[in-house]
Image: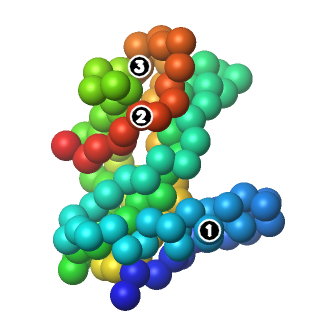
Amino acid sequence: MQQLQFESSWDKQIAPQDRDNIEKFFNETKHLNSSSVIFSPIREAINHKEALLVSVLVHNFTEHPLTFQNAPIQYSVNDNVIAEKEFTLPDLVIPSQVSMPWTFIFPKDSYRVQHSFKNGRLELK
C-alpha cells in the first residue's frame, strides 16, 4: 500500500498548511493505477533567481527504490517541452511504494520562458 513520506529537510521546514494540502493531495492520488513512477504536479513558480520551480508529488509505485543519478527530467506544458535537465540528487531516495513531495529546480538557462507554466507535466525520460 502506498505511503506518504517527507524527506527530512521538508519534514522540518514545511508549513502546517502546506503539509495538510500535500496530505490531502496524496489521498486523492495514491490509488492511481500504475506500476511505475508518476509525478503529480503541486505547483509551479519562478523564484528570485529566475529559476523555474516545479513542485510535484513523486509516486514510486515500483518494487524498487527510486534514485536520481544523472536522471533526465523534462517539463512540458500543452505537450511542448519547455524545460530539460539531468538531475543528480544523492540524498533523495524514494523507497518502493512511497510518495514524496519534491521541488525540481530548472535554472534560468534550462527552460523556455512562457506566459504560464501551469498545468504542466514532469516526466523522467
Q: Which mark is residue 24?
A: 1
Tell me the kind of residue under disc 3.
Tyr
In the visual, does 111 lie left or right of 115? left
Return the x and y of residue 65 as percentages of the image width and height: 29, 74
Q: Quadrant of the C terminus?
A: top left
In the visual, does 11 lie left or right of 3? right
Tell me the kind of residue under disc 2.
Gly
Q: In front: 62, or 78?
A: 78
Q: In front: 14, or 93?
A: 14
Tell me the kind of residue under disc 1.
Lys
In the visual, does 108 lie left or right of 72? right
Q: Nearer the viewer, mark 2 or mark 3?
A: 2
Q: Earlier in the sequence, mark 2 or mark 3?
A: 3
Q: Nearer the viewer, mark 1 or mark 3?
A: 1
Mark 2, other Cα within 10 Å: few <14 / some 14–19 / many ≥20: many
Mark 1, other Cα within 10 Å: few <14 / some 14–19 / many ≥20: few
Mark 3, other Cα within 10 Å: few <14 / some 14–19 / many ≥20: some
Q: In front: 84, or 78?
A: 78
Q: Earlier in the sequence, mark 2 or mark 1?
A: 1
Distance from Cα at disc 2 to Cα at disc 1 = 20 Å
Q: Which residue is mark 2?
A: 120
Q: Which residue is mark 3?
A: 111
Return the x and y of residue 64 as percentages of the image width and height: 23, 76
